[in-house]
Amino acid sequence: MPIVERVDPKSIFTPDEWARLTARNSWRGMWLVAHCWGVIIGAVALVAIWPNPFTWLIAVMIVGTRQLGLAILMHEAAHGGLHTSQKINEFVGQWLCAVPVGASLAGYRAYHLKHHRYTQQPEDPDLGLSAPFPISKDSFGRKVFRDLTGQTFIKQRLPLFMALFRDGKPVEVHDDETENFLTSGAQAMRNFLILNALLFVLFYFAGAGVWFFAVWVVGMATWFPLVTRVRNIAEHACTSTGPDPFSHARTTHANFIERAFIAPYWVNYHAEHHLFMYLPCYNLPEAHRLLAAKGLIERVDVAPNYLDVLRLATSRVTPA
């Protein structure tokens, strides 16, 4: 299949608009990474100071969402958007964003750019994430149960752990249910384990060693897979596989609660990202506003919220 049609931004935006949209601010990119880690530390501090089931649950959800946030910022680095210095962009994207959640920036970039090149086409490595939808509510419920009970986590991570004993042979994890940002081999798994051991040491000397497991690890094993799944569904499920590049991805409006617990760092503006993939994430809302002002947003699948997307994605009726 040919690669998907590209939209010429010069046919849509004025030179001043395009210059504003593509402007990258290295300080802002670094602030996003610091913000993500700051929220994680704040959530752990919350439950450490006021330990009870409610604060623990909130902390797990916040940390799991910010673990997704680290993956999103890794994605930003894959597009060169965290810092104008390539060396800083690569270092921060790899060691502060990718490795803590078990990913590899270089491996993710190669995989992800293929997704952009063949979005919703047979060669798209993410096509399996969207092709089965809509599914039944029962099927979705089973997936949610697997996520929240750690089964998805084990299914994804166990092969990567076993890569340590495969003489360096690379291992690819892709189960057609969650985005393949975990493609890696033994060295990537070693990096993940070493960095997480360092995190445990830092938690321990801060007097919160138990919360490394009760919040960081539990969040990674439960809420992180769930919100990753919801994000994947919102981005491409039940969108078009036709030739119009405006129809290949969905933008979902997100309120404060959704941004806090499902969709951090403007990841909900996915259609705009696919149309103009090298825009920094913090400029995607402005791209959305300009497309609306120019009467082009009607060509884009825009959902009012994540609940509406899930209703659509689970609309298949199970035969009696």
Image: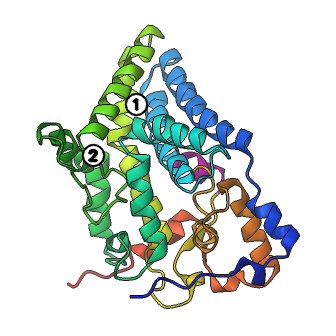
Dot label at residue 153: 2
In terms of depth relative to the viewer, which is nearer, 256 or 74?
A: 74
- Distance of label 1 from label 2 (alpha carbons): 13 Å
Q: Is residue 168 above or below residue 256?
A: above
Q: Is residue 171 left or right of residue 77?
A: left
Above or below: residue 256 compared with residue 174: above
Q: As rendered, which of 114 and 48 lies closer to the eye?
A: 114
The mark found on residue 278 in the picture is: none
Q: Is residue 94 magenta?
A: no
Left or right of residue 9: residue 97? left
Residue 3 image position (x, y, % from top left): 47, 83
Name the residue: 56% across, 57% down.
Answer: 79
- The amino acid type of the residue labelled 1 equals Trp
Instruction: Please provide the residue range marked out in magenta.
Output: 255-263
Secondary-structure class at tag 1: helix
Disc marking residue 216: 1
The x, y position of residue 132, in whole percent, is 31, 77
Q: Quadrant of residue 302?
A: bottom right
| Helix, strand or loop: magenta stretch | helix
Q: Residue 166, how many percent across, how many down? A: 12, 42
Which kind of residue does numbered mark 2 sit on? Phe
The answer to which of marks 1 and 2 sits earlier in the sequence is 2
Residue 310 seen in the current view: no
- Near mark 1 (Cα within 10 A), the count class, few <14, some 14-19 or many ≥20, is many
Q: Position of residue 248 (x, y in %)?
A: 52, 80
Q: Residues within 10 Å of mark 2 (few under 14, many from 20)?
A: some
Q: Residue 262: say if magenta.
A: yes
